[in-house]
Amino acid sequence: MASIRKDITTSATPESVWDAIRDIGALHTRLVPGFVVDTRLEPGARVVTFGNGMVVREPIVTVDDEGRRLVWGAEGGPMTHYNGAVQVHAEGTGSRVVWTADFLPHEASAVIGPMIDEGLAAMKKALGGCA
């Protein structure tokens, strides 16, 4: 199983960053606009349309307000297994956001790594307005 862990820092407070992350139906408007162009909620999941046209159903596993951690899966993409987690940590007067993805097949890292980079860049840009 491949695993990717990447992070960004922002001047936004952990509370404001977590508020945007936990708003699971607003990826396309609050958290990663452009990277995600539409998010539709279903019971226990969200259906995400990415800017590249890929549509993935993401079952929500955990929304941990105390730990500021969101965990989700993915169905309908190119992988046989995907588990993603985003967690917010205080860092100085701002925040560090850590995105971890575990997935199969291992070869998908050539696609998933750049997608995570693009998502984090969109997140950093969007969160700049949260500070």
Image (cartoon, grey):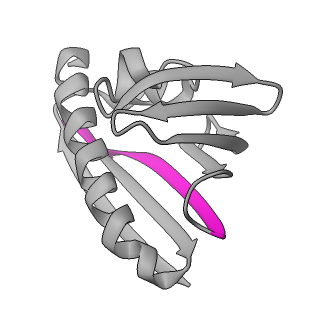
- In magenta stretch: residue 84: yes
- The outermost residue toward the front is 53
Which corner quadrant of the image does residue 14 belong to? top left
Name the quarter where the C terminus is drawn: top left
Q: Is residue 42 above or below residue 129?
A: below
- In magenta stretch: residue 49: no
Q: Looking at the picture, how far across and down is residue 50, in whole percent?
A: 42, 35
Q: Looking at the picture, how far across and down is residue 10, in whole percent?
A: 19, 37
Q: Relative to the observer, which residue lies in front, 131 or 121?
A: 121
Residue drawn at 83 percent across, 26 percent down = 43
Which corner quadrant of the image does residue 57 belong to? top right
Q: Is residue 117 above or below residue 125?
A: below
Q: Is residue 3 above or below residue 118?
A: below
Task: Let me know if residue 76 appears in the view.
Answer: yes
Task: Let me know if residue 92 appears in the view.
Answer: no
* Span highlighted in magenta in the image: 80-95
Is 36 on the left or on the right of 19, as rendered? left
Q: Main secondary structure of the magenta part?
A: strand
- The outermost residue toward the right is 43
Residue drawn at 62 percent across, 49 percent down = 71
Q: How many marks?
A: 0
Is 95 on the left or on the right of 73, as rendered? left
Name the quarter where the N terminus is drawn: bottom right
Residue drawn at 38 percent across, 63 percent down = 112
Residue drawn at 31 percent across, 65 percent down = 113
Q: Looking at the picture, how far across and down is residue 65, in whole percent?
A: 62, 34
Is 87 on the left or on the right of 78, as rendered? left
